[in-house]
Amino acid sequence: MSERSAAAPGASGKDNQHLAPKSDIEISQAAKMRPIIEVARDKLGIPGEHVQPYGHYKGKISLDYISSLAGQSDGKLILVTAITPTPAGEGKTTTTVGLTDGLNYIGKKALCCLREPSLGPCFGVKGGAAGGGYAQVVPMEDINLHFTGDFHAIGAANNLLAALIDNHIYWGGEPKIDSRRVSWRRVVDMNDRALRSIVSSLGGVSNGFAREDGFDITVASEVMAIFCLASDFADLQRRLGDIIVGQTREKKSVRASELKAAGSMAALLKDAIAPNLVQTLENNPRHQVPQGGPEARHHGDRRDDPRAQNAWRRRQG
């Protein structure tokens, strides 16, 4: 038996990864996670009363606490830009997580800020979005699936507006929306090609006026883009009210605020807008401060978002 093969059974952790590779989920499930309240306190200096736990290892940070940091000095931002991943899967997330762990290892104060995964790609060819190998954020399964329910809230807000539009048309409310010119689509956070183009309101008079409709994936919706761009709850509600849902027969734009939809939509997002907090395999903080989903986040530059700025302030030095 060679020295190499003899050493393999006794090797452990990363030393053994090249000789007996573990899958991403095996590595993730073997992680020794710390309670998220401890990570927030020890790594970020956030008191426990400002952390809303979602189980032991996930949490949300109070918007009131984030607002209280506005007067602090800015930290430094390192942007890991879009790159083509290697065949093994090293891309933006693994690079960002590895860089964060490396900076913390040499004594720097660093956290990584990533987008939330979408269920569509998770169950498609792409797979999950929590990193890979020993550069992962955990709990990986929770993050890749329902996480803290943010995407479900965004989908519900989007589809609430769709329901209000059809109800408005059914009852002939003012302004009178031309059912042929409704631009607002429903969403589902899944890759479902059968729903891309449909006919809705079939089944008789009581179900409304039949019209062409369709579904987008939740993460590519306008509500997701607004969620990513909003700086606080009031700004979120204002932006939701500005959504153009369709046109009248005179081709005049109709906004969500004219249907009195913004308040109800914002109420569904009241918890989702608070940033999420999880950890890397090395127990360093992973924030989801401004990013939202992986598609709509490209609609705007987040450097002016107070939630992002305050995250950087906490890591100054």
Image (spheres, rainbow, N blue to C red):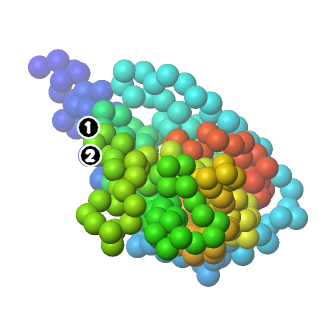
Q: Marks 2 and 1, Cα distance to the nearest angstrom? A: 6 Å
Across and down, in percent, residue 92 comes to 53, 33
Label 1 near label 2: C-beta < 8 Å?
A: yes
User: Where on the picture, by quarter, is residue 288?
Assistant: bottom right
Q: Residues within 10 Å of mark 2 (few under 14, many from 20)?
A: few
Q: Which residue occupies 70% across, 37% down?
A: 78
Residue 260 seen in render? yes
Residue 279 seen in render? no
Across and down, in percent, residue 62 comes to 64, 73
Report the amino acid beneath label 2.
Glu
Quarter of the image that includes the N terminus: top left
Q: In the depicted view, which residue is nearer to us: 199 or 229?
A: 199
Q: In the depicted view, which residue is nearer to us: 252 or 278?
A: 252
Q: Which residue occupies 56% across, 38% down?
A: 96
Report the amino acid beneath label 1.
Lys
Q: Name the residue that disc number 2 marks.
A: 26
Image side of residue 224 versus residue 197, left or right: right
Q: Which residue occupies 40% across, 61% down?
A: 209
Across and down, in percent, residue 294 comes to 51, 43
Q: Name the residue that disc number 1 marks.
A: 22
